[in-house]
Amino acid sequence: MNKVFGLILALSLVAVPAMGQNRSQGGISPDMLREIVKSSGTKHNVAIRNAMASNSIDDLARNYRNNTVSDTHFSVETPKQSIHNQRQSGRCWMYSSFNVLRANFARRHADTLRVEFSHDYLFFYDQLEKANLMLQGVIDCADKPMEDVRVQFFFKNPINDGGTFCGVADLAEKYGLVPMEIQPETFTAERTSRLGQILSSKLREYGLELRRMVADKKSNSAIKQRKTEMLGTIYSMLSLALGEPITQFTYAFRNRDGQTVGTPRTYTPQQFYRETVGGPINGTFIMAMNDPRREYYKTYEVELDRHTYDGHNWCYINLPMEDIAAMAIASLRDSTKLYSSYDVGKQLNRNTGYLALDNFDYASLFGTTFPMNKADRIATFDSGSSHAMTLTAVDLDAAGKPVKWKVENSWGGDSGQSGYIIMTNDWFNEYAFRLVVDKKYVPEKILKAAQAKPVMVMPEDPLFSTDD
């Protein structure tokens, strides 16, 4: 044993100076710093440096030619509806999904009836279900060390307010829907960050307790009972912050002028869901993704990317942008809006609600270039889906090719183009990522590929963050 210990000690002593030597070679030495300064050319940029000292980067890089949007005509446009505001929350996925559902309802009634769904109601169950997903995930992985990547996944992300269309499909089918006026927004629903932090702390505490119960060989029934008690506390916390979910209500539909139509009826949330949505959402759509890193016309499934433990993982078919655009156009031609998501922060002119690749010229301002393509940006975490919006219109040229697109946003009616954002087709190709399409607008070739057994991918992938 002494000989073995001596060998280990000797090897460790040899390794220390070698590691230190490598760090020295990789660091910035005085000579290297002089070369850095010499090659930077900063002496020639005095005017820009002075301007940047007292102005924002975006103001200096803004392309003044794009500071107004003169062309707001769209050859194909779906009927307008009221604009909502997610405020300081990450629930864009729910707003975009509800935009589609309420537009479909109005379309089925020849645009004579309107409905507004409560975000607060479904968000309550979204948070409760995500809490259960985390706690059960911790139980399932309790035999793994804390350093395991899957264990860390649950403890790093106990709960969040982001999501995808798949979440609304599972949650609404399970818990139903209620009108917005029956369960309106609370202060916390519109400002979710503090609640998320508090719930995360509680769930991490509970996760450690459940791991100890598994380590102590407690019975499955005892662990399940304790998890149920924990979720009771989470339910109470959510009730205080969001209000307890409505279980029954009386409601009469309204027309587009806000006038009551017909006699008020009593509904449960599940009955109201069937009345307004009609039937199951799952199985009626495909989710398309554009990921140039992966093979096209292949189906992929993201492990653990779901809202409910017993729900559906996010499953998508990877397609070229040309196919995604064609399905979007087919849907819009039939007056059907679509859930879609983008890297909306790239080149967004918030004042005009306009997205174009040349809104801001950072390259000229900083005297460099930004040559990465879409695949490179995804692989390096430089770009990915960050915000869901509802695709509502497209402008086509004489050959039927898209020139620009319009989306209904959830930042309020006073943002952008009266609540909408216009994007060029070039920007759309570079920064659009997800599109949810009703199967009736999907070509047979794509439908067949979407039915293939999916390849499982990990949630840590740079492209698979939730929309918020």
Image: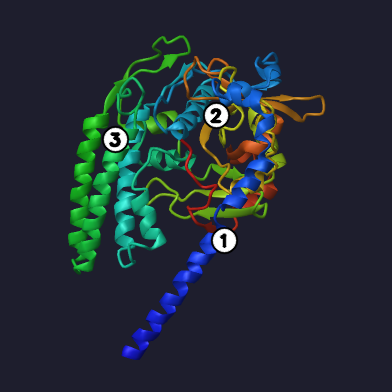
Q: Amino acid at mark 1?
A: Gln
Mark 2 Cα shell of 10 Å, populated few (<14), some (14-19), many (≥20): many
Which is more toward the observer, 167 or 420? 420
Question: In what element is the residue under mark 2?
Answer: strand
Disc 3 marks which residue?
Answer: 195
Rendered position, 287 above or below 148: above
Q: Looking at the image, tell me whether mark 1 or mark 2 is earlier in sequence order.
A: 1
Q: Which mark is residue 390?
A: 2
Q: Nearer the viewer, mark 1 or mark 2?
A: 1
Question: Hey, which quadrant is residue 268 in on the image?
Answer: top left
Rendered position, 146 above or below 380: below
Question: Hey, which quadrant is residue 185 in on the image?
Answer: top left
The CA span between labels 1 and 2 is: 52 Å
Residue 130 location (% of width, % of height) = 34, 45
Which is more toward the observer, 47 or 443? 47
Q: Nearer the viewer, mark 3 or mark 1?
A: 1
Q: Amino acid at mark 3?
A: Leu
Mark 3 Cα shell of 10 Å, populated few (<14), some (14-19), many (≥20): some
Query: Quadrant location of the N terminus?
Result: bottom left
